[in-house]
Amino acid sequence: MQFLSKMVGARIYVLAAALVGMLMMAGCGASTSPNTVTATPSFSPAGGNFNSSQVVTITDTTSGAVLYCTTDGTTPTTSSPQCSQPTTVFKSEYLQAIALAPGKTASAVAAAGYTINLPAAATPTFSPAGGTYAGTQTISIADATTGANIFYTTDGTVPSTSSSTSSTLLYSGPITISKTQTVSAIAIASGFSNSGVASATYTINLLAATPAFSAVARSASTPTPRSSRSSCAPIRDTASKTAHLCINAQDSAMDRRLTRSRPSKCVLQQNKHQRIPFAANAR
């Protein structure tokens, strides 16, 4: 009986040892040694909230490791662009990276989110301000943010942040406005978010030319009575050049007649019953 017990115990021991050996072999075959995996990259500074752009350095402790990064939310692979060192984060973004060293497998993915709360650049100003003007205006655009670039339009559209559109121009000096237009401007500067859009409307009302006066020669063949001496002077409008006005210099009522076509005679009406003609060729 004792012999039988010993035989059974021996067999159980052998089976247990064999099972342990098989389990160990299976475990070794399925696992990967930590020494064959590239270390996971790290970021400095770590992700977080910031009030200015951040210069981020990405490092890896595995010698010879090459870093691959994405900023568009996709998982990086060895086909992704290599990380710039250091990389500057100008605006809020999600940075991810992997590392791969020679003779090793790729690392786990490292990720960090950076929220950048930049102050806005100052809104541009115009001089003179928008309004109604009687002639052509020279407009200056200024911005209080040091180093700011100003982009503007003159057709009322919102300017882009580059001169990539046909209507957006980079401001380089005063601009001339000779007709009614709306000027809009935006400023951009390093370390700042884009400014608000400033707009000003300039209404240009050009004045008509002022008429000029000239004396009219009196014909000797048509004397004027002493009691009603007069002068006849045409008003020559620089646009039509035909308007004439006759004036009685001594009549307190200053009876006047204006005609828009070239008159054959310059006629003065002194009263209801008397007309004093002048020469037909008088100018």
Image (tube, grey):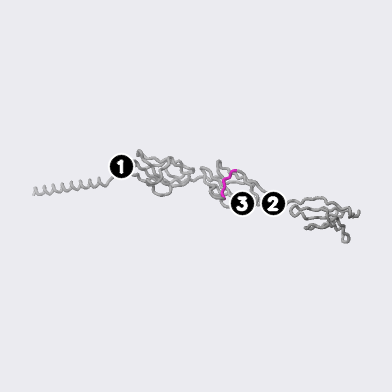
Give me the residue at 76% from left, 51% from top.
211
User: Mark 1 highlights which residue?
Assistant: 36
User: Mark 3 highlights which residue?
Assistant: 182
Along the viewing direction, whichever of 264 and 44 lies nearer the viewer:
264
Along the viewing direction, whichever of 158 and 164 lies nearer the viewer:
164
Label 2 to label 3: alpha-carbon separation: 17 Å
Image position of 86 (left or right of 121): left
Looking at this view, name the residue that lies furthest to the bottom.
273
SS for tag 1?
helix
Across and down, in percent, residue 131 comes to 65, 50
Query: Mark 2 or mark 3: which is in front?
Result: 2
Overall secondary structure of the magenta stretch?
Answer: loop
Q: Answer whether labels 1 and 3 touch (C-beta < 8 Å).
A: no
Image position of 136 (left or right of 157): right
Query: Label 2: few (<14), some or many (≥20) within 10 Å?
Result: few
Label 2 to label 1: alpha-carbon separation: 82 Å
Across and down, in percent, residue 149 comes to 55, 44
Q: Which amino acid does label 2 sit on?
A: Leu
Image position of 61 (left or right of 144): left
Q: Which amino acid does label 1 sit on?
A: Thr
User: Mark 2 highlights which residue?
Assistant: 206
Does label 1 or label 3 sit earlier along the sequence?
Answer: 1
Label 1 to label 3: alpha-carbon separation: 66 Å
Residue stretch rendered in magenta on the structure: 167-172
Instruction: Please give the label number shown on residue 249.
Output: none
Across and down, in percent, residue 32 comes to 28, 44
Q: Which amino acid does label 3 sit on?
A: Thr
SS for tag 2?
loop
Give me the residue at 80% from left, 55% from top.
244
**Labels in figure, total:** 3
Query: Label 1: few (<14), some or many (≥20) within 10 Å?
Result: some
